[in-house]
Amino acid sequence: MHVHAAPPSPGASRTQSVLRFSLVATLAYVVVTFVAGLRAHSLALLSEAGHNASDFLALLLSFVAVYFQTRPADPSRTFGYQRAGVLAAFVNAGTLILISIWIGIEAVHRLSAPVVVQPKLMMIVAAAGVLMNGVIAILLWGVARDVNLRSAFLHMAGDTLSTAAVIAGGAGILLTGQNWIDPVLSLVIAALILWSSYGIVRETLNILLEGAPRGVALGTIRDGMQEVEGVLNVHDLHVWSLGSHSRALACHVTIADIPPSESACILVKLNHVLKEHFQISHTTIQFEHVDCVELEGCVVPMEELARGQSESHHGHAH
């Protein structure tokens, strides 16, 4: 069996530069927003500080994941570190969900016990946040090619929208004097965070649990493989994601009792179908030429099972 690790992305250095700039800018804004939130007594600004603190963690995790994804496979990590970015995205989305719950609880508390806020300071700090988050979101959009960077982009895009909402909330308080606008705005921000996190959690959890990739139907893959001339049957079919853009397949294929040179042609055709039609380039295909049963994870020909032998006559190709 041969293992092929994904080659380092040619844009990895540019991605790391974008993430490095984003980290510095986000950390500076977290400090400013937190101090301003305390002075303005604004839960919305403190929520933004917490949200941006999670963004800093998200960006840091993404930065580390990008570094690990460029490392080659080794005897201990035979698939390389393709799932480093997936794991980072899962942690990022999980922290966002926790923060949104905290914001929601604090907002409900403030609705019952309103606090006077300083809307002008809210609006000034939020305006700076819209500019910073918007620039970072645009930069991340240009390099967001996998679920890891897409989760970081969603963090920053969500921040841009929620910070713009803080400006609107500050204007509302300034015009009406109604301080309940601040906690209500915080609830809206919390809902936005939950919405942006749900899809990332679902996708990354599916990859980590080795579920079938999104949009992949095993029946369709099996039918496509069985249309290849010489293939009698496809069974014990498994398809999973190594990373957000890398799929793997393992299966057993029943063929006639033919010479290895002929079976090699069938293997080439099968891999062509899988790569061109299903974007699956890492395959492990085991050929068999008799009816088999599965015994303790190993496929054993029925005729040999009846004789009580421990070895099976089947070919293995990759």
Image (tube, rainbow, N blue to C red):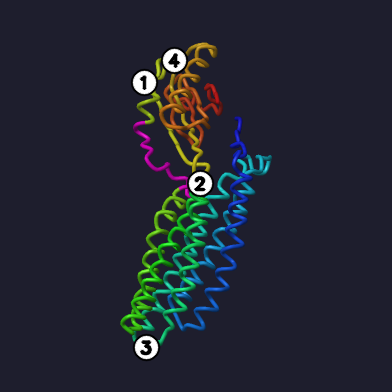
Q: Residue at x 51, y 82 (%)?
A: 38
From the top left corner, tell me how far across and down residue 5 is, in percent: 60, 36
What is the CA distance from the residue labelled 3 to the residue labelled 4? Answer: 78 Å
Position of residue 130 relative to residue 3, above or below, is below
What is the CA distance from the residue labelled 1 to the residue labelled 4? Answer: 15 Å
Our reading of the magenta stretch's main secondary structure is loop
Callouts 3 and 4 close, C-beta under 8 Å: no
What is the CA distance from the residue labelled 2 to the residue labelled 3? Answer: 44 Å
Position of residue 265 relative to residue 93, above or below, is above
Foreground label between 3 and 4: 3
Q: Is residue 212 magenta?
A: yes
Secondary structure of the residue carrying tag 2 is: loop
For marks 4 and 2, the one nearer the N-term is: 2
What is the CA distance from the residue labelled 4 to the residue labelled 2? Answer: 50 Å
Q: Which residue is denoted by mark 4 in the rendering?
A: 256
Q: Which residue is denoted by mark 3 in the rendering?
A: 113
Position of residue 153 relative to residue 315, above or below, is below
Give the crowd class for mark 2: few <14, some 14-19, many >=20 residues within 10 Å. Answer: few
Foreground label between 1 and 4: 1
Residue range corresponding to the magenta coloring: 207-220
Query: In the image shown, does 22 or 128 lie closer to the viewer?
Result: 128
Q: Residue at x 38, y 83 (%)?
A: 109
From the top left corner, tell me how far across and down residue 157 is, in percent: 44, 58
Q: Which residue is denoted by mark 2 in the rendering?
A: 142
From the top left corner, tell me how far across and down residue 174 is, in percent: 36, 81
